[in-house]
Image (cartoon, rainbow, N blue to C red):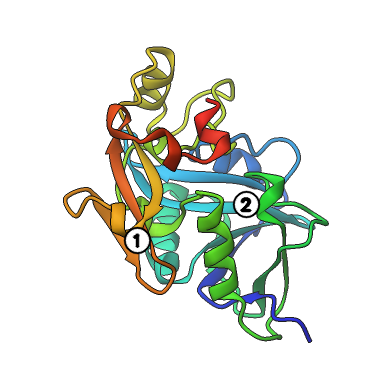
Amino acid sequence: MTATRLTNRAVIRLTASEPSEDLRGFLQGLVTNDVSGALPVWAALLTPQGKVIADFLIWENGADLLIDCDADATDALIKRLSMYRLRRKILIARDDTLAIHWRAELQDHDPRMPALGSRWIGTVEGEAADAAWLAHRLSLGVCEGAAELGDLLWLECNAAELNGVSFSKGCYVGQENTARMNWRQKVNRRLVVVPLDRSDPGRQRVAYPALGLAVDHLRVEDMAPDLLPEWLAAD
């Protein structure tokens, strides 16, 4: 069996315990992307200042919604979403019966870009594909997860270029600063995947010695053109 399971990802299930509860409406006022239409989408939950708390993909599963997120961030994300839930009759819990799967061959493509390959939610079985996914993702210059994104401003994480933000959906937490940066074109720094031997230790977010790569948080004027992926160089 081909290895497809991403063991460092987990699934959070949102369920309406009363028919009147609107799950999409609940997330729509919280996350950066528009969840009123076709899913999956890549999105983030931000601080009021527009900094990343967590990034994730949102999927539809019958009447429920599923959040595909960093396994290590699951409990904190559930706690934060539960805080915003207030008195709504919505169940928010980890679903350990499901797992995230990926393969490089294109079928149902990742919403960030087709080149990332196919991604789906399935049963908890199969061999781990985490190493292959990491190498593939970084080869395309795409960053994700707490180790790489940390608490950076969402647009500094290349969210606009990777379909991780809607500028027309209306208010969400952190929307004001995010929209202002976009309108004023004030994205002064960005995350860039670079060869390890060209990484700046003072600006390095995380290093992957086995791959010879690192993720740096660089000022735009310091980004060497030959290090930029095509989708960012063309921006």
Say what amino acid the circle numbered 2 marks. Ile
- Residue sitting at x 50%, y 31%: 233
* The one of 213 and 102 positioned closer to us in this rendering: 213
Residue projecting furthest to the top:
184
Q: Which mark is residue 147?
A: 1
Characterize the local packing of mark 2: few (<14), some (14-19) or many (20 or more) Cα atoms within 10 angstroms: many
Relative to 57, is 70 on the left or the right? left
Characterize the local packing of mark 1: few (<14), some (14-19) or many (20 or more) Cα atoms within 10 angstroms: few
Q: CA distance from mark 2 to mark 1?
A: 20 Å
- Residue sitting at x 79%, y 87%: 1
* The one of 15 and 151 positioned closer to us in this rendering: 151
Relative to 206, is 122 on the left or the right? right
The answer to whether residue 168 shows anywhere in this view is yes
Q: Which mark is residue 58?
A: 2
Q: Earlier in the sequence, mark 2 or mark 1?
A: 2
Helix, strand or loop at mark 2? strand
Measured along the vertical axis of the image, is residue 70 above or below residue 168? below
* The one of 33 and 194 positioned closer to us in this rendering: 194
- Residue 22, by quadrant, is top right
Residue 80 in the image, given as x and y percentages of width and height: 38, 55
Residue 115 in the image, given as x and y percentages of width and height: 69, 49
Say what amino acid the circle numbered 1 marks. Ala
Measured along the vertical axis of the image, is residue 226 above or below residue 144? above
